[in-house]
Amino acid sequence: MSRINLGRLAVMVCGGLGVGPAAFAAGTACGSLTELKVPGIAISSAIAVAAGQFQPPSQGSGAAPVLAVPAFCRIVAIATPTSDSRITIEVWIPETTWNGKFQGVGTGGFAGSISYGALAEGIRRGYATASTDAGHTGDDLIFGHGHPEKIVDWAHRSVHLMSETGKLLVRNQTGRFPDRSYFNGCATGGHQAMMEVQRYPADYDGVVAGNPAADRTNEIVAYLWNWLHTHAPDGTNLVPPAKLQLLTTAAVAACDADDGVKDGVIDDPRRCRFEPASLLCTASASASCLTPMELAAVRKVYEGPKNPRTGHQIFPGWPLGSEGYGPGPGDGWRNFLDVPEPRRVGFFQYFVFNNHNWDWRSMDWDRDVAYIDAKMGFINATAHDLRPFRDRGGKIVMHTGWVDPILPAGDVIKYYEEVTEAMGGPDQTKAFMRLFLAPGMGHCNGGPGPNTFDALSALEAWVEKGVAPDRIIATRPARAGAGPRTRPLCVYPQVARWSGTGSTDDAANFSCVNEHSK
């Protein structure tokens, strides 16, 4: 089963409990939800949880953080849409503080885990909230080896079933369906948001799609490209991690003030005219310069993968300023360079070629890339015609960080511009879909720029009150040597510009203007 008819199943569930519609108006006690009879769905537990501290079950090494929660009904369901599927779904419904709305939340990477932190945040905001493990356990892509249905579950089916099952459980626990339904996710969660929009446009009234990894197949192809061009045949990293921070420092120094404000952030890396060759060693190699080999390697990452026969850009390159934006061991490009094998190489081994011993150095950048697109394109959320979602009144708030080292902002912009063309132009697209770029923000958060903001409230106001977001205020807390900062995130292609008076750390002194250029 891949789709639930909510109205039909509400009647079936009523009959399974031996009650009529009038009795349902008062809802069903939390503990009694295990008696629900839903085709393809087993309710394994339904427990009333008291307000206070909730300890999520461990999903890996170590105990999960304790979460502060209001009183809620915790429901665990198992969906089996195919004989090779086992999708875990958790639905949390506030006991007394429900706002009448439903929220689906996303996951990260290929993670087979429940997003407990997002569930807790959702019910604290009053939402009935649902999360899924996407049909497997852990982040190792071996789950898809010989299990094509599990790949479909991860790609889109699990979130759809979570969404419809979640709303059905809300109906039976509270006595009514949610007034509004929203999806909120970043990274893979952003990918899931766009899968819902494209494949199941009736599931949600609005989605927040953060840093959406829409073109997942070619993103992973790009990881392989980056690794191969920055490593010797024996696997030695050709670019010392310290050189990544050297590049970021030099790029920021060269382009920081391009937007009229010197604040340690590159506003739009596409406008940055920094030339990495300016760091080329003129004498002996040292930590303060790049050798010709190092320069050639990082240039390939900036360029991104291209088809050697046609010159076609397979995936955008990584932007200036994303090389080493943070002090942590996995920050910046170290996520995919300072590792013993290409990031997500299991995708090729287990999803594409079904060969654990597949040699990643054998990649044919023409034939193999075409084969990957043809075989695995169904995991991408790159459809451009979004009329079914738009015509239902659906709204999309999309955002991404300019120094995201995992998913380059160029891919998000490319997709948004392709949608804009398919939907008839900027005005027609902005009527239901808006993109916000965050200068200095990394992968969903982090980075030197303001990176904390409330996209969900902006989406709610748009869906429920017709107030389209023209800007979203992002914040960055005080840090060593710098006070707190707020900045507006503007609707693409607008950018934030300082008025010339007042603090440059105060969003009130900035306006959104049209001066975008590629």
Image: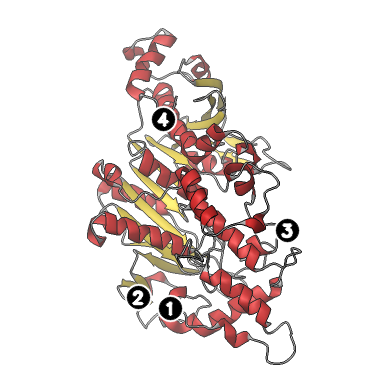
- How crowded pointer 1 is (Cα within 10 Å; few <14, some 14-19, many 20+) is rated as some
Say which label, 2 or 3, has the lower sequence index: 3
Where disc 2 sits, the SS reads loop
Q: Nearer the viewer, residue 264 or 401?
A: 401
Q: Position of residue 213 (x, y in %)?
A: 49, 53
Q: Disc 2 or disc 3, which is closer to the eye?
A: 3
Say which label, 2 or 4, has the lower sequence index: 4
- How crowded pointer 4 is (Cα within 10 Å; few <14, some 14-19, many 20+) is rated as some
Q: Nearer the viewer, residue 389 or 229?
A: 229
Where disc 3 sits, the SS reads loop
* Looking at the image, residue 127 lies above or below residue 188: above
Pick the quarter of the image with the C terminus: bottom left
Say which label, 1 or 2, has the lower sequence index: 1
Mark 3 — residue? 340
Q: Please give the name of the residue rendered at 49% of the width and 81% of the height, measured from the top-left corner.
A: 256
Q: Disc 1 or disc 3, which is closer to the eye?
A: 3
Q: Please give the name of the residue rendered at 32% of the width and 54% of the height, measured from the top-left corner.
A: 433
Say which label, 1 or 4, has the lower sequence index: 4
Mark 2 — residue? 517
* Looking at the image, residue 217 lies above or below residue 259: above
Where disc 4 sits, the SS reads helix
Mark 1 — residue? 271
Residue type highlighted by circle 2 = Ser
Pick the quarter of the image with the N terminus: top left
- Can residue 442 be seen in this snapshot? yes
424 on left or right of 2 = left
- Can residue 267 be seen in this snapshot? no
Q: Are marks 4 and 3 in contact (CB under 8 Å)?
A: no
Say which label, 1 or 3, has the lower sequence index: 1
Q: Name the disc covering residue 164, or none.
A: 4
